[in-house]
Amino acid sequence: MRRLMISACLVGERVRYDGKVVKFIDERLFRWVAEGVGLPFCPEVAGGLSVPRDPAEISGGGGGEALLSAKASVMTRAGEDVTAPFYRGARLALDFCLTHGVGLALLKEGSPSCGRHRIYDGHFSGTRISGSGLTSALLMRHGIAVFSEDEIDALTERMG
């Protein structure tokens, strides 16, 4: 079975910006972690952000790809630029995957780091738009297949 990086919040770790536990529960994730196949990781905490923290969104449009091209930034609701810790966390996530032989990632949809298909619009309006977070974009750029929690059945098939 292939190794898998899992957003730590999806296995109950209190790493979300608000310190709450994600309500997503799928026993397959816990089984993969127990078997050593699933490896929890939170790029935002790894990058140096605290829990709890002010919510952040990608501003400037273009999502994670725009961040990788230095055409966007990550800002908190209070107006603080937190782009640097998001970059650091994404790079650490990639290093983690390369070090541990991870070829697949299951990441939290909507997150400015981990979103795979949808992120928030950068205006703190609650509006979701198409796009990926910074970590998702970086991992995909390096050939790591990224799935959201909405795609766990497809991931299970891919796991073999």
Image (cartoon, rainbow, N blue to C red):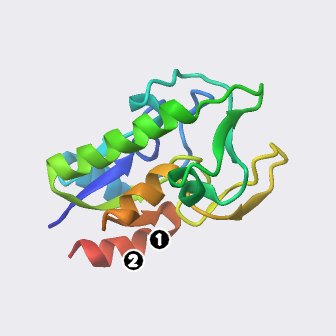
Left or right: residue 127 compared with residue 143 = right
The amino acid sitting under disc 1 is Glu
Of residue 155 and residue 143, the one placed in the foreground of this image is 143
User: Residue 63, located in which quarter of the rendered image?
Assistant: bottom right
Give the vertical position of 57 relative to 61 (above or below).
Answer: above
- Where disc 1 sits, the SS reads helix
Labels 1 and 2 touching (C-beta < 8 A): yes
Q: Which residue is mark 1?
A: 151
Residue drawn at 49 percent across, 61 percent down: 149
What crowding class fits label 1: few (fewer than 14 Cα within 10 Å), some (14-19), or many (20 or more)? few
Label 1 – label 2 distance at C-alpha:
5 Å
Percent across and percent down for residue 93 are: 34, 44
What residue do we see at 41% from left, 37% from top?
89
Query: How many numbered discs sit on the rendered protein?
Result: 2
Q: Residue furthest right?
A: 125
| Apparent side of residue 96 relative to residue 74 in the rendered image (left or right) | left
Quarter occupied by the N terminus: bottom left
Q: Secondary structure at mark 2?
A: helix
Q: Residue at x 32, y 62 (%)?
A: 142
- Residue holding disc 2: 154
